[in-house]
């Protein structure tokens, strides 16, 4: 795995993931987020969410870097195996976490579903970028 290909794969993944996050975790079912306003931090509820967005983007960069690295380091032969690992990671980590959180935190069910699908999109983007560039 060459460094330049790794950097390109990460940059492509970060750009695409920021768009998928915006769609699945920001735009889709936007009105449903307001169903339980008491669950949001006061700064976010007041519309001052730039700090939270910045931290979220930083975590997206870390996610993309880690997932692209793992995909390249384990040299998953063929796209089908890489996609299978991606779906396995999705079912093992974000889905149980988000479903469990939605059982204890007041979130509209469509918001939880949207976040689950958003995480699948994010991981698939990382997988496809890594598979193409590495």
Image: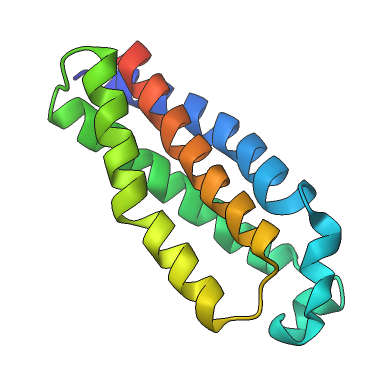
Res 65 visible: yes
Report the front residue among 1 and 37. Answer: 37
Say if 18 sits above or below 9 in the image. below
Residue 5 location, x and y as percent? 32, 17
Report the front residue among 81 and 51. Answer: 81
Residue 98 relative to residue 72: left or right = right
Say if 61 sits above or below 101 in the image. above
Which residue is the extreme one toward the left? 74
Q: Quadrant of the N terminus?
A: top left
Report the front residue among 102 and 52. Answer: 102
Q: Which residue is drawn at 78% across and 48% down?
A: 27
Res 46 quadrant in image: bottom right
Q: Which residue is drawn at 26% across and 24% down?
A: 82
Residue 28 relative to residue 19: left or right = right
Q: Which residue is drawn at 86% across and 71% down?
A: 47
How is the structure coloured here? rainbow
Residue 81 location, x and y as percent? 22, 22
Report the front residue among 35 and 77. Answer: 35
Residue 72 location, x and y as percent? 21, 26
Q: Quadrant of the C terminus?
A: top left
Numbered label tally: 0
Q: Residue at x 21, y 36 (%)?
A: 70
Residue 100 location, x and y as percent? 44, 72
Say if 25 sits above or below 10 in the image. below
Res 48 visible: no
């Amino acid at each position: 795995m060459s460094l330049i290909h790794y950097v390109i794969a990460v940059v492509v993944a970060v750009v695409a993931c920021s768009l998928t996050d915006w769609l699945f975790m920001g735009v889709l079912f936007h009105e449903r987020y307001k169903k339980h306003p008491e669950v949001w931090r006061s700064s976010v509820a007041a519309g001052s969410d730039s700090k939270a967005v910045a931290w979220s983007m930083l975590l997206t960069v870390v996610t993309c870097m880690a997932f692209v690295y793992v995909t390249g380091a384990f040299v998953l032969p063929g796209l089908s195996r890489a996609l299978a690992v991606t779906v396995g990671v999705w079912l093992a980590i974000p889905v149980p976490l988000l479903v469990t959180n939605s059982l204890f935190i007041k979130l509209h069910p469509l918001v939880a579903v949207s976040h689950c699908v958003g995480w699948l999109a994010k991981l698939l983007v990382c997988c496809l970028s890594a598979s193409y560039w590495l």
